[in-house]
Image (spheres, rainbow, N blue to C red):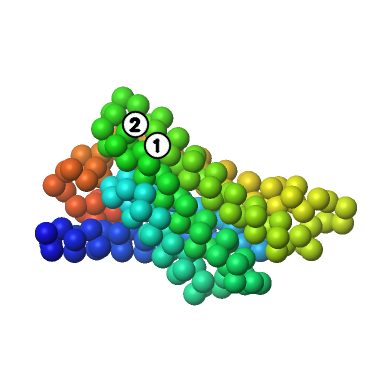
Amino acid sequence: MQNSKTKKLVEISILVALAFVLDYVANIYSRWFWPFGGSISIALVPLAIISFRYGWVAGFMGGFVMGLLQLLTGAYIMHPIQVLFDYPLPYAVLGFCGLFTKKVNNDIGDRSFYIFLAIGIGSIARLICHIISGIVFFADYAPEGMNPVIYSVVYNTPFVLASYVLSAIVLTVLYSRYANRLILKSKENVTSIVSDSMNSI
């Protein structure tokens, strides 16, 4: 039992670290397009794997920790509530992907559909968090005459949508090739394919 808990903690830690690195790299080039935060990133991929393996609670916690790590690398901070809605919470709600754990792990024929559906729901929840932050805390940055709601939607939707599509595609490819190792019931450890799977993308 202790070995199982240790394995789970190690896997989640590695996947959270991978998500952080992927997002950090994406933010380097995305600052030109989204100066107040945001990037087209596949950081959702390892976070979704956590959710699919261990459920939405583990995914929620993993995403929350990943968001906290972002605060250490040049976060745009205006207000404590804004920090919550722009960093820990948007990544935490990606854990809702875990609501489809059984479908992704068992329904081989419909797995791709449920991956896109799960990632879509998580991404919508993430987008809502960013939009709320934009409306409440970044309204002053909206172009003159533009409604803050429209500004927040226009600013946040492109990178969240692009991240959703890319992440869903990558996850579909990974599960089509490595499902026997990604699904928790397998005896294989997910850490054994992290490097192989990323190199094959």
User: Residue at horizontal 83%, vertical 51%?
Assistant: 146
Q: Residues within 10 Å of mark 1 (few under 14, many from 20)?
A: many
> Could you tell me residue 115's position as x and y percent?
40, 37
Horizontal side of 164 relative to 188 (left or right) equals right
Q: Position of residue 85 (x, y in %)?
A: 57, 61
The local secondary structure at tag 1 comes to helix
Look at the numbered discs 1 and 2 and tell me whether their residues touch, using CB distance below 8 Å: yes
Q: Amino acid type of disc 2?
A: Arg
Tell me if I can see residue 25 in this picture.
no
Where is the N terminus found, in terms of image quarters?
A: bottom left
Q: Which residue is drawn at 88% across and 53% down?
A: 145
Q: How far apart are marks 1 and 2 (CA)?
A: 6 Å
Up-down relation of residue 176 to residue 64 (above or below): above
**Residue 28: percent from the left, percent from the top?**
55, 64
Q: Quadrant of residue 4?
A: bottom left
* Residue 199 picture location, percent across and down: 34, 50
Q: Residue furthest right?
A: 145
- The residue singled out by tag 2 in the image is 111
Compare residues 137 and 183 and report the one nearer the observer: 137
User: Which one is nearer the viewer's eye here, 52 or 190?
Assistant: 52
Label 1 sits on what residue type? Ile
* In this picture, residue 96 sits left or right of residue 81: left
The count of marks equals 2
Q: In which quarter of the image is the C terminus?
A: top left
- Mark 2 element type: helix
Q: Mark 1 points at which residue?
A: 115
User: As rendered, which of 113 and 148 lies closer to the eye?
Assistant: 148
Q: Residue at x 77, y 53 (%)?
A: 148
* Figure quadrant of residue 86: bottom right
- Please rate how many residues cluster around mark 2, counting C-alpha atoms within 10 Å: few if below 14, some from 14 to 19, many from 20: some
